Image: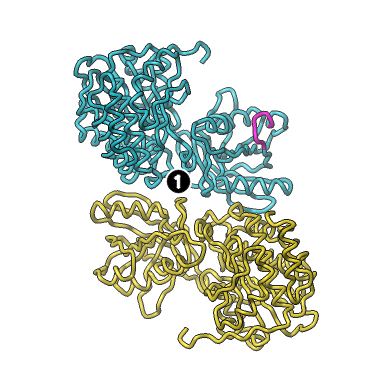
Chain colours: A cyan, B yellow
Amino acid sequence: MKHGVAFLVMLFSVQAEAAPDPARFLWRALSERGAYARAVRLADEVGARLAGSPAAERAVAWALAEMKAIGLENVRTEPVTVEAWSRGADDRVELVAPYKRRLRALALGRSPGTVAGGVSAEVIEVSSFEALRKLDVRGKIVFFNHAMRRSRDFEQYGTVGELRFQGAIEAGRAGAVAALVRSVGTGSHRLPHTGATGYDPKVAAIPFAALAAEDAELLHRALGRGKAQVALNLGCGMRGPIKSSNVVGELRGRGKPDEIVLLGAHLDSWDVGDGALDDGAGVGIVLETARLLKELRPQRTVRIVLYMNEEYGLSGAKAYAVAHAAELPRHIAAMESDSGAGVPLGFAMPGIEAARSIVRGLARPLAALGSSEVTAADEIGADLIPVHQAGVPVVGLQQDVSDYFEWHHTDGDTADKIDPEAISRASAAFAFMAAQLADSVEKLPRFVPPKND
Amino acid sequence: MKHGVAFLVMLFSVQAEAAPDPARFLWRALSERGAYARAVRLADEVGARLAGSPAAERAVAWALAEMKAIGLENVRTEPVTVEAWSRGADDRVELVAPYKRRLRALALGRSPGTVAGGVSAEVIEVSSFEALRKLDVRGKIVFFNHAMRRSRDFEQYGTVGELRFQGAIEAGRAGAVAALVRSVGTGSHRLPHTGATGYDPKVAAIPFAALAAEDAELLHRALGRGKAQVALNLGCGMRGPIKSSNVVGELRGRGKPDEIVLLGAHLDSWDVGDGALDDGAGVGIVLETARLLKELRPQRTVRIVLYMNEEYGLSGAKAYAVAHAAELPRHIAAMESDSGAGVPLGFAMPGIEAARSIVRGLARPLAALGSSEVTAADEIGADLIPVHQAGVPVVGLQQDVSDYFEWHHTDGDTADKIDPEAISRASAAFAFMAAQLADSVEKLPRFVPPKND
């Protein structure tokens, strides 16, 4: 514990307007480590839990039991239809010329499988969509090769990530028969990073897989010696609708029960790794926040939502916004924890400065944790997009993600990657802001989405 | 290149007794990077090449072609019988209680498979053989859990490695039905480290597998909550004799062609990864040394031997010692390169101080590379054990292995893990010592093995 007596003194001296006894609250949040314990248990006991899989339903049962054990009210599932995608048993990506090598690869979420017998073609390497547009790739396999740099924020994921998010559309539009992308991640652990990719109904959907960094470099070296041919055999694909659930629990507000503060994380993960950082950490943080808030008994109702299928469909997020449409005007704020287990740096709040100014006041006691800065960055958690677009003010906890993309969406996203000290700090900052939002006298102005967003 | 003009000046000022123009020689060895290029090509073009597999025979063909391209004389294969071991297609290690989780594991080399239907039993965790001997593990699965620390030398591999080398014997003797070991390696990449294990004909052979560090920790946490049960289904096993080869080439000595300096590395690798560090790096270093020595035309004959099946049988090493028994008295020195691609630190030479003293003189010009120290450490390369026991003086290049055990025997042992600068320095030190041994006037005293070794 790095923040001992000096930290407590500082907290007492800048006590917030409404939340009772922030020093005691924050000290408990930092020292009891319930976020860590819950994240590890979810990762260990359930492990990978792809939306649409039986493991995802085990995660639903786990979450219901946890919420009941904490003593939340109205603990329930809410129905979500998942348009399921899954990987095949025998995905293979192989370099077949100039020499034969199996490449470590993972099909990307939403990718169709290949036709029977697979697809085999010459590979054309590009590092950007601009470069792609200058080439004739008809009948070829496009290989997007652009290494991601480590960064404390999501900037690299946003920019380099475009190659994964839009690569199948861009390559498909150009006439390619398949596409490969160097894993969007900073690791070199011979572990490919999967993730969702987008398709455009107006463009033929082509198979799309991510290569481990090592295999991207092997393919790059092979191309340096001349032409290279790759064969893809992917058994993945969309499997049709499957019934699943969000898991919801509440703490009824002591003074303003009709006003809701929404706290979210997502219960599903990818089918590789144990979903420890993504998003076991967030589930742990949100459940621990609920446990702490229960004893505070804030003015407003706090609603915990653990969403299903953040990863490749936002199915639970969309279902929540539809089912609770009539209630959204009474959602006075929302937070999601979905940025791993790194230390807290501050809060992100897109929209008008007046809203940030209020949050800045609420965050002030967190200066001692180095997390009182409030910016306009667009890092709010994907599950909150639908309610945000409906006007709900969203406060995003910003965390240091320097290590997050080492393991993001890989088989190495396991419990040992969570640093107990770091997640405890993130959890404390998250819980403190949640308490402030649930108790503050001042209300945040509603979010007005930009016209062309 | 870190050693420019100052380095050259230093070399000229301490010119060695016999090797012609060491400055020019070392400068070429450092700057032309042939070891790096060859190691990468072997890893990329052949990849994993387990002894007994078709890929190992592709490596034999690759090596023959390389030796001929360099212009070695008497390039040939020499017969080796490999008592083949291989992994099954469907190895599975699963935690079945207190919850079900698949554990990332690799059967260890020489391990038998499990009986049909597998073996499932309670797990008993120990961190040492001493701890094991105090427990009743009859009918149980023993889990050796001891984390390896990073180290510049092989000390940790020797000590922690004992759990892998002897674990099946110790656990089998105690009545266990199977054994698991935390991977002997320093990585946390969700990649198990395989490797050979020993069996004693007097003890029932039990199945033995290595867990990835992450999965060892998961199992440890599960055991922290009570009893844990694991099921092993291993399809591995010994497959009987398969004909394979060492690959041999020579540079006939200009003045003393009957005196032989033996330079070795091993051609085989494990069946995971690309055998880049282990031992593509060594193959690259030895072939590059041959290329450089060809132009020096040393006094003695230099014989390059690329051994088959260092990894789980020393088959090629034993075959060489038998086939060349009559010649061994004329082997005046031997070196092997099998410690990865790290920077050179000096030389190891077990035996009498008089021999080390001579080697110290030969190594003096390497002070500029930080690799002139000569110690009595027992790091000589396993393939040289048979000839060493027959009296051949062995000079081992010591390299910094701090990073080596991150990837050793894992799927992450790929070409990108070789640092071109570091392997060039190791290659230069190796080639320089080889040149000195092939040209030196003084002869090393023969090695006299300790009586009870």
How crowded is the residue under tag 1: few (<14 C-alpha within 10 Å), some, or many (20+)? many
Q: Is residue A128 magenta?
A: yes
Q: Which residue does the image show at 65% across and 35% down from the upper left?
A: A127
The answer to whether any part of residue A326 appears in the image is no
> In the picture provided, is B439 more to the left or to the right than A54?
right
The answer to whether any part of residue A452 appears in the image is yes
Specify the subunit that label 1 lies on.
Answer: A
Q: Quadrant of the N terminus of chain B?
A: bottom right
Q: Is residue A413 above or below residue A170?
A: below
Residue A430: quarter of image: top left
x and y, in percent, of residue A29 in the image: 28, 34
Closer to us: B254 or A180: B254
> In the picture provided, is B374 more to the left or to the right than B23?
left
* Number of numbered tags placed on the structure image: 1
Residue B433: quarter of image: bottom right
**Amino acid type at mark 1:** Asp
> What is the span of residues highlighted in magenta in the rendered image?
A126-131
Q: Is residue A112 magenta?
A: no
Q: Which residue does the image show at 59% across and 75% down from the upper left?
A: B316
x and y, in percent, of residue B413 in the image: 55, 56
Residue B29: quarter of image: bottom right
Q: Is residue B255 above or below residue A313?
A: below
Query: Which residue, given by chain and number where applicable, does mark 1 sit on?
Result: A411
x and y, in percent, of residue B374 in the image: 59, 73
Q: Which residue does the image show at 56% across and 71% down from the upper left?
A: B310
Q: Secondary structure at mark 1?
A: loop
Closer to us: A156 or B92: A156
Closer to us: B331 or B248: B331
x and y, in percent, of residue A89 in the image: 47, 46
